Image (tube, grey):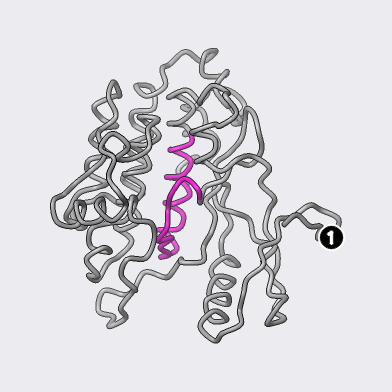
Amino acid sequence: MKGKWKGQPVAVKTVNVSGKSRAVSFLREVKILAQLRHPHVLPFYAACLKPPDHCLLLTDCCTGATLKEWLYPRDGSTPPSTRRRLRIGYQIARGMRYLESLGIMHRDLKPSNVFLTHPGKGARAIIADFGLARPVPEPDSEAVLTGETGTYVYMAPEVIRHEKYTGAADVFSFGVLLNELASGLVPYSNAHYTPVQVAFGVADRSLRPELASGVDPGLTAVIVSAWSQDPTERPTFIGITDGLDAMSVQLVGDDGEALGDVDDDAGGGGLAGLFKGMFGGG
C-alpha cells in the first residue's frame, strides 16, 4: 500500500504474523533490511511491531514498474533497448555485490523482485523483497538452509536438489536474469517447459535458457560462468562487476553523446560513466 511517514510517501508492506514461524520470519526480514544502505537495494525506513494485524514494513516508494513489467510491457509500448537492459543488469550486479559483501543471500532474485525507482529515463534498478534473505552460513557451520527456496526458473541446481548451498546460488539466479536482460526473452520460453520441468532439467541435465544472440562474447562468458552447474566454478559478484566494468565500451559503445541518451543518471558518459563515476571502486 501507499502511505506517508514523516510527511514523505512510502510503500507499506503488511505482513501476516499470526503464527510463531511467520513472526520469526518478519523479524528476520526487519533485521536484514535495517542494515542495508545501497543505491540499488530497497531503502528501509521503519517497522511496526504490533502483532497480529499491524506488522508493517515501511520502505521507499518506487513509482516505476517491476523489472518484469518493464521488460515485457503490456500497454503496447516499445520494449527497452539492449543497451538500457544491460545498464539495468549492471546495476543489479552492483546491488548483489553489496549484499555479498555483507554475507547476505537474497535467495529469490528474479524480475518481479526488482523495481525501478520511477518511470522514464534515469530510473535506477532497486533489489527488493528480502523475505527469504538469509546470512550466508559459515563454512564449518552445521546450519542447513531450506531447499527449493525461490523460483524454479531462476533457482540454482544445488538448491533444487536440497543440497547445502551458499551465495553462489544467487550468482546462478543472476546469470539467468542477465541472459534474460541481454536477450529480452523470458527464460525457456522457446521450449514451453513447465516450471517443474525446468527444475528437473536444471538439476539433472544442466538445462539452461537459450543464450542471447548478437552480444559481446565477454558478456556471454560472464553469463555461462554464472550459471555453471558446479557452484565452486561460479564467479563472485565482485568478479562479475569487475568483468562488466572491463567490457563497458564493448557493451554500450564509446560515443558519449549517444550514451547520454540512455538513462544517464550519472551526469554524462552513459553506462561507462555510471560504472566509473557514480560508484567508483565500491
Q: Is mark 1 on a helix, strand or loop?
A: loop
Q: In which quarter of the image is the N terminus?
A: bottom right
Image quadrant where residue 43 sits: bottom right
Q: Residues within 10 Å of mark 1 (few under 14, many from 20)?
A: few
Residue 244 at x, y = what percent? 36, 35
Residue drawn at x 57%, y 24% as measured from the top left: 76
Q: Is residue 94 left or right of residue 145?
A: right
Name the magenta segment's main secondary structure.
helix
Residue 181 within the magenta-colored segment of the rendering:
no
Amino acid type, mark 1: Lys
Answer left or right for 47 relative to 42.
Answer: right
Name the spot of residue 82 as percent of width and height, x first.
43, 24
Q: Give the range drawn in magenta.
A: 88-112
Position of 250 relative to 8 (above/below):
above
Check the image and name the residue furthest to the left.
205
List x then y, in percent, for residue 107: 40, 61
Residue 81 in percent (x, y) is at: 47, 23
Q: Residue furthest right?
A: 7
Residue position marked by numbered label 1 in the rendering = 6
Query: Residue 220 versus residue 189: which sits nearer the camera?
Result: 189
Q: Eyeballing the image, is 104 above or below 72? A: below
Query: Image quarter for residue 90?
Result: top left
Q: Nearer the viewer, residue 221 or 190?
A: 190
The residue closer to the viewer here, 99 or 8, is 8
